[in-house]
Structures are given as structure tokens and as C-alpha cells.
Amino acid sequence: LRRLRAPRAAPPQPPAPRASRPVRVDHFVDHYRLMSADSDFRFSEEFEELKHVGREQPCSAADLPVNRPKNRFTNILPYDHSRFKLQPVDDEEGSDYINANYVPGHNSPREFIVTQGPLHCTRDDFWRMCWESGTRAIVMLTRCVEKGREKCDRYWPYDTRPVYYGDIAVTALNESRYPDWTVTELLAARGAEQRVLHHLHFTTWPDFGVPEPPTALARFVRAFRERCPPDHRPVVVHCSAGVGRSGTFITLDRALQQLAAHAEYIDIFGMVYSMRRERVWMVQTEQQYICIHQCLVAVLEGQDLQPPA
Ligand SMILES: CCc1ccc(NS(=O)(=O)O)cc1
């Protein structure tokens, strides 16, 4: 009789959140108004649905004792399956490790390499990652020091003298300063090879917060794409932990490219869902999630993104 008994049914699991919530572009402004009504009640509900996405995935490399000092925050660790792997150095344990993940963009599933703000002890690894990935653009979304706390090591030269990071010599060729960001052309040389990289540094984005006004971020994304059109090479993006501000920037870049391509739908929820499968906490706060929507509303309403005179 025992053999005849039906196998025990698995205990009921909470339904997994849908992975996408597309919104018609021609309904997006009305959608924003509905979601933000009653003190952003529906935005809160929707953002909460993302809470557990990706969290079951292992971070075993990050947890190795030899790699623990390479993590700026003990609770912001790269998932094994999407982490960027440095070329191992001899048989040195942990020499392939950096706190960084590939993250999808509008143009490819591994368009971005998202990483923490380099530590002093990892900035040579950071430059090895930049060189080995072939990137030609670094997007920085934090200041090195904020409210007296170090958020990122100064990993590029202060002046035009070359600085060595491991065996990579970096020289600042020129710098252009704007109210909310600074663009620097960096020459990186390794052996006989030289490359020019764009370093785009957004300087007015408070940690855990949003740019003020939010449209400053849309202007920065546009300035980034004017200098760095899609080129099949990954773009390195970082803030301090490499999750909140980095995820917000990438989501807006994806959405603005979809609008430019005259997409019929925009799926912010689905973009953040897909990014969180690759790196933890991408778009960290509800306000950052709402800021993305506010930027798109401004663009759709044809608001001139230029800063006030
Ligand atoms: C507590 C770890 C942590 C620190 C800072 C941030 N913000 S950031 O990802 O925008 O740099 C996110 C998480």
C-alpha cells in the first residue's frame, strides 16, 4: 500500500514575481501618475517585488579568505555566475577575483561591467580589469570622499604625469569640467600598446539618494552616449558599492535607448529584475527607482533637459 501512496506534494511556495511589467510608452506618463499617487503607494509595492530577485545565487569566490579584503562592503558580493574573472597570475589563489559583474544593457547581455569603487588594495586589479576587458569607457557615479567618508580610491592621476597601476601606465590627457560632471581622456599603456579611455565622472549624486534635479542624470546619460556610442566593448560602471547609483544609471541608459528606438513598451521593472539576477541590489532604493521614471516622464513630455540658465 505504501508503494501505491502518491508522492508527497511539495509544500506550497510563494508565487515568484513576474519578471516583467511592460508599460505602453503612450501610457507611460499616466502610468507614472497612477504609481506615484497616495505617496508613491504603487511604486512601493512594485519595488518590494524585486527584493529577493537573484539572492539565492552563490558568491563563493567573494567568500574565500584570500578575497574577503578585496570587498569594500561585506554585504555587497558578486554572484559567481556573472562575475568578471581577471587573467589568473601564475597559481596565485584569488588572483582572478575582483568585485565586479557583467550586467545586461540595451545593446548586449554583457554590455556593462559593474564594480565597486576601487579600494587602494584593488586599484591595480581595477586597471587590469579595464585593460583585459578592452573597455574604452569608465563611468564613475560617486565622489572619492563624501561626508568625510572614503567611497572610492583615487585610481586615476591628479595631473598630467603618468601613474603606474601595476604594469599599466595611466596619463590624463585632458579634462572638461561641467556643473554636474567631469570628463577626462585617459591614455592607458601596457607594454607597447596604448589606448584612450573616456572617464565620465558624475560629481553631484549623493549616496543612497538621487540627483537634483533628476533630469541632471538624463543629461549625463546623453553626454555619455554622445562620447561613447555602443561599440561592442563593455562599459565599466562604478559608484561606491556598485549597486544603487550604478544600477540607476544603467536602467536609464537602457530606457532612453529604447525610447530613441521608438519602442512601443518600456519595462523598467523587467530591466531591474534582469540586472538583479546578475548583481545584487541594482537600483538600491525606491527613490532611485522612481527617479528613473521621472527622467523618462521629462523626456516624454519634451521637457528641455538643458539646465536652467
Ligand atoms: C551598505 C553598502 C552600500 C553602500 C553604498 C551604496 N550605494 S551605491 O551602490 O550607490 O554606491 C549601496 C550599498
Image (tube, grey):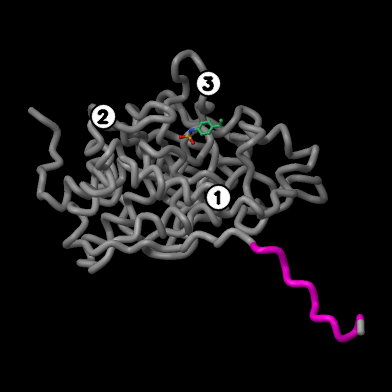
Given the image, on which type of amino acid does mark 3 rest?
A: Glu
Q: Which mark is residue 150?
A: 3
- Lower position in the chain sequence, tag 2 or tag 1: 2
Helix, strand or loop status at disc 3? strand
Q: Is residue 59 above or below residue 26?
A: above
- Label 3 vs label 2: CA separation? 22 Å
In the picture, measured across the screen, residue 308 lies left or right of residue 150, that is: left
Q: Is the residue marked 2 within 8 Å of ligand 1, measured from its CB?
A: no
For residue 212, the mark is 2
Residue extending farthest top: 148
Position of 226 compared to 208: left or right?
Answer: left
Q: Earlier in the sequence, mark 1 or mark 3?
A: 3
- Let me know if residue 124 is in the magenta part: no
The residue range painted magenta reads 2-12
Judged by its main secondary structure, the magenta piece is: loop
Q: Observer-nearest residue: 141 or 90?
A: 141
Which amino acid type is marked by label 1?
A: Arg
Q: Residue at x 18, y 53 (%)?
A: 30
